[in-house]
C-alpha cells in the first residue's frame, strides 16, 4: 500500500458500501461508479448486490459484490484488507447497512433490541475499526456513516432505531474531531424520508403490529419521500465538500434547527403527532 497520497474525489477512488444491494446503498454505489469510483458492494442480499454490480460494470464502471455480514468483525476486517490489497488504497467506506423496527417500545423483545443495536451500531463500529488504522497509515480516507433524522430528534414508534441513530451521530462527530489530525474525514448522513424498502420494514427489519401495508404507505407518502438516486447525487456533492452532518431532503434542516433552538417545542409537537398516529393505527 502506498502512503502520502491524497483522497480522490471521486474519480479513480476506491469505496466500500455496506448495504449496497438496495435503497440508499444501491443509489450511492451507482452514483459513485458514475463519478469514476471503483465500488465494492457488501451485503447479505448477495443476489441483489451482484445485480447492482453487474449493472455498474455493464455501464462501464468498476464494481464487485461480496456477501458480508457487517456484525461479523473478522469478515469486515477481511473485506477492507482485501480491498486495499486489490486496489492499493481505500478512499471511502460507507457504513450504510441498517434496519428498522417499528412500533411502540413496549412491543419490543430484548432480541429486537439486540438485533437493531448489532446491525445499526455495531455494524458501523466494525466498519470503522476495520478501516480506520489503514486510512491513518495511508494518510487519507473518508468514513461516511448513515444515521437518520431520527438521530437528531425524538422519534416515537422508532425508539430502538432512534437510539442507534443518535449513537451513530455522536460517534461520527466525535471521531471527526479526533481523525482530522491524521487527514481522515468523517461525515454522517441524516436522511429524512427516502423512498427505500426500509419504509415497509425492509428485508431484515419489521413492524411489530399488524398494520395494513397500504396505511403505512399512505403515511410515508405524506412526507413526500425523496428518490434515493436524487439523494445520492446531493449527498456525494456534500461529501466532496467534506460536510460534517449531511441532511437531505433539505427541508428537514428546518426541523433540525428548530429542535436545536427549542427542544421543548419539538417535543410537544412530536407528542401531538404521536397521539394522532396512535389513533390512526390503533396502537
Image (tube, rainbow, N blue to C red):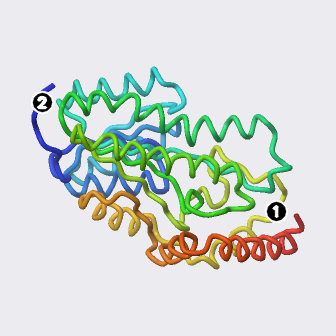
Please provide percent x and percent y for residue 224.
56, 78
> Which residue position holds label 2?
3
In the image, what residue occupies the spot 83% across and 55% down?
209
The N terminus is located in which quarter? Answer: top left
* The one of 275 and 51 positioned closer to us in this rendering: 275
**On screen, residue 198 above or below 93:** below
The answer to whether residue 157 is left or right of residue 22 is right
Would residue 171 be seen by someone viewing this image from the given angle?
yes
| SS for dot 2 | loop
The answer to whether residue 21 is left or right of residue 206 is left
How dense is the environment of label 2, judged by Cα within 10 Å: few (below 14), some, or many (20 and up)? few
Count of numbered circles on the image:
2
In the image, what residue occupies the spot 64% across and 79% down?
222
Please provide percent x and percent y for residue 94.
38, 45
How far apart marks 2 and 1 lie (CA) works out to 54 Å
Mark closer to the chain start, 2 or 1: 2
Residue 152, image quadrant: bottom right
Amino acid at each position: 500500500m502506498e502512503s502520502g497520497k491524497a483522497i480522490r474525489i471521486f474519480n479513480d477512488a476506491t469505496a466500500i458500501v455496506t448495504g449496497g444491494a438496495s435503497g440508499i446503498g444501491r443509489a450511492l454505489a451507482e452514483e459513485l461508479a458514475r463519478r469514476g469510483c471503483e465500488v465494492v458492494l457488501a451485503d447479505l442480499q448477495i443476489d441483489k448486490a451482484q445485480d447492482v454490480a453487474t449493472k455498474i460494470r455493464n455501464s462501464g464502471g468498476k464494481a464487485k459484490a461480496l456477501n458480508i455480514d457487517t456484525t461479523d468483525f473478522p469478515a469486515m476486517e477481511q473485506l477492507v484488507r482485501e480491498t486495499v490489497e486489490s486496489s492499493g488504497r481505500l478512499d471511502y467506506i460507507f457504513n450504510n447497512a441498517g434496519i428498522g423496527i417499528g412500533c411502540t417500545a413496549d412491543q419490543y423483545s430484548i432480541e429486537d433490541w439486540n438485533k437493531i443495536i448489532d446491525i445499526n451500531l455495531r455494524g458501523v463500529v466494525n466498519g470503522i475499526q476495520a478501516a480506520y488504522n489503514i486510512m491513518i497509515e495511508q494518510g487519507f480516507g473518508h468514513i461516511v456513516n448513515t444515521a437518520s433524522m431520527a438521530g437528531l430528534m425524538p422519534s416515537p414508534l422508532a425508539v430502538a432505531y432512534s437510539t442507534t441513530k443518535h449513537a451513530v451521530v455522536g460517534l461520527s462527530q466525535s471521531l471527526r474531531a479526533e481523525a482530522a489530525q491524521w487527514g481522515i474525514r468523517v461525515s454522517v448522513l441524516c436522511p429524512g424520508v427516502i423512498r427505500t424498502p426500509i419504509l415497509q420494514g425492509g428485508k431484515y427489519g419489521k413492524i411489530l403490529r399488524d398494520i395494513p401495508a397500504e396505511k403505512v404507505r399512505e403515511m410515508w407518502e405524506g412526507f413526500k419521500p425523496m428518490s434515493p438516486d436524487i439523494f445520492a447525487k446531493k449527498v456525494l456533492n456534500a461529501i466532496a465538500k467534506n460536510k460534517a452532518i449531511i441532511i437531505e431532503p433539505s427541508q428537514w434542516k428546518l426541523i433540525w434547527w428548530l429542535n436545536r433552538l427549542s427542544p421543548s417545542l419539538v417535543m410537544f409537537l412530536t407528542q401531538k403527532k404521536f397521539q394522532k398516529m396512535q389513533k390512526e393505527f390503533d396502537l
